[in-house]
Image (cartoon, rainbow, N blue to C red):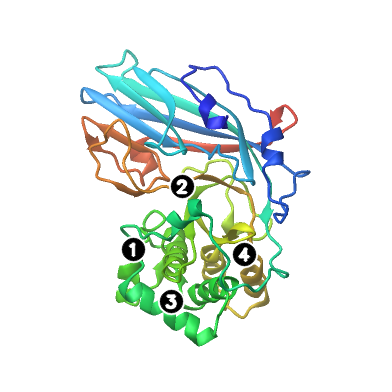
């Protein structure tokens, strides 16, 4: 039974899970360091104004489906919601918390607190000795990740661009092609700190306008769409930074992480599994530190982030083009990485935590307490 099958409405109680199934599920090729797990408490505090007759809230929660680099030990909630539950996004396995309020609250405010205990371990693959096979068979369960999404089509200019990349680099194997796409995104993309939120990931528009700038969703979506167009299964993983980085200060955050949502990417390699990549963080360090791409620090990050995720970050889900249930008045979301709330059917601005009145915090757990 998967851990998500245990998730249910439990008031202020706590859910706990064993780790033995996680240990047994790993592929031998993956070099996750199980001796070096780090524990965190992720907390959401949401206060919605007591206006209107009803309010609804949805929160993305850490993935509980044994991805190999993190697992969730438990979640709990408290607050004055009329109705609340731990659930999943539609028919998917991705965990969420949802709450509803009906009528006026005695406190004149709608309040909820959700806390999750999560462990992470750095996630990397050794790709140096991967066999150079051109036609390795894909499992049927993976083929869905070749499909386009609304903002990541795989035809037209996307397909033309990736064919040009592959031809220029004479990339024959899946691994060679994925690396060529990764390097092309870094060589041609640009991190733009002025982009609102984490970007939209509208790949077709970026290519048509020849404007390959943005933040993590834009830059990593560019990799994902191009990989799919090259017949390489790929996906974004949407989550949040939870700790300082040991690699560079500008790609980590600890404590108040209300505006630290972060997207990463991965592609599927037959015989190895999902391979982590992170071109957006290479470009972020380059831009914010004003370092050219040939600087030794950037060269090292470029090499490291093809096959490695530093796990100072949590994954929520890789859902795209999704609808929130119970039926939200918002049209389909391109992705779900930020809290989402509605009052009398009107959507609040998820990218403005101050006016939305939510705060997300992280705390590293040392022994039985938190590190401050």
Q: Calculate the distance from the C-alpha at mark 2 to the C-alpha at mark 4.
A: 23 Å
Q: Is residue 179 depicted above or below 241 in this figure?
A: below
| Residue wearing tag 1 | 202
On screen, residue 290 versus residue 9, left or right, reads right
| Residue wearing tag 2 | 259
Q: Calculate the distance from the C-alpha at mark 4 to the C-alpha at mark 1.
A: 23 Å
128 or 70: nearer the viewer: 128
| Residue wearing tag 3 | 162
Residue at position x 46%, y 30% from top? 45
Quarter in which the N terminus is drawn = top right
Residue at position x 62%, y 72% from top? 133
- The crowd level at tag 2 (other Cα within 10 Å; few <14, some 14-19, many 20+) is some
In the rendered image, the residue lying farthest to the top is: 106
**Of labels 3 and 4, the one closer to you:** 3
- The crowd level at tag 4 (other Cα within 10 Å; few <14, some 14-19, many 20+) is some
- Visible in this render: residue 145? yes
Quarter location, residue 80 = top left
Q: Is residue 169 depicted above or below 119 in this figure?
A: below
Quarter location, residue 204 = bottom left
For the residue labelled by badge 3, is the local secondary structure a helix, a strand or a loop? helix
Q: Tell me which numbered mark, 4 or 1, is placed earlier along the sequence.
A: 1
Q: Say whether marks 2 and 1 touch (CB < 8 Å).
A: no
Residue at position x 36%, y 57% from top? 196
Q: Tell me which numbered mark, 1 or 3, is placed earlier along the sequence.
A: 3
| Residue wearing tag 4 | 305
| Picture coordinates of residue 267, whole percent (x, y) | 53, 61
361 or 215: nearer the viewer: 215
């Amino acid at each position: 039974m998967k851990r998500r099958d245990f998730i249910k409405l439990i008031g202020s109680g706590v859910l706990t899970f064993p780790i033995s199934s996680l240990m047994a599920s790993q592929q031998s090729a993956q070099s996750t360091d199980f001796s070096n797990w780090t524990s965190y408490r992720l907390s959401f505090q949401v206060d919605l104004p007591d206006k209107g007759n009803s309010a609804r809230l949805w929160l993305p929660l850490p993935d509980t489906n044994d991805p190999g680099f993190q697992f969730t030990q438990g979640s709990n909630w408290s607050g004055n919601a009329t109705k609340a539950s731990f659930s999943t996004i539609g028919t998917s396995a991705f965990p969420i918390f949802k709450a509803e309020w009906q009528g006026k609250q005695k406190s004149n405010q709608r309040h909820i607190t959700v806390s999750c205990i999560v462990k992470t371990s750095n996630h990397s693959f050794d790709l140096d000795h991967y066999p150079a096979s051109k036609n390795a068979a894909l499992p049927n369960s993976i083929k869905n990740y070749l499909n386009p999404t609304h903002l990541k089509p795989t035809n037209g200019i996307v397909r033309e661009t990736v064919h040009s990349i592959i031809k220029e680099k004479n990339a024959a194997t899946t691994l060679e092609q994925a690396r060529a796409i990764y390097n092309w995104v870094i060589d041609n993309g640009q991190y733009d700190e002025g982009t609102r939120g984490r970007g939209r990931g509208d790949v077709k528009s970026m290519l048509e306008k020849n404007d390959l700038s943005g933040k993590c969703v834009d830059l990593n979506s560019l990799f994902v769409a191009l990989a799919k167009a090259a017949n390489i299964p790929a996906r974004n993983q949407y989550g949040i930074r939870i700790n300082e980085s040991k690699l560079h200060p500008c790609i980590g955050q600890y404590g108040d992480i209300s505006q630290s949502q972060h997207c990463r990417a991965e592609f599927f390699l037959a015989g190895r599994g999902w391979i982590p990549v992170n071109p957006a963080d290479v470009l972020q360090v380059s831009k914010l530190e004003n370092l050219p791409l040939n600087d030794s620090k950037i060269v090292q990050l470029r090499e490291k982030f093809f096959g490695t995720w530093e796990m100072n970050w949590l994954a929520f889900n890789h859902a795209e083009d999704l609808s929130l249930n119970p039926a939200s008045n918002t049209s389909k979301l391109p992705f779900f990485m930020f809290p989402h709330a509605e009052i009398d059917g009107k959507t609040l601005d998820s990218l403005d935590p101050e006016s939305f009145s939510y705060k997300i915090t992280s705390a590293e757990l040392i022994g039985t307490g938190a590190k401050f």
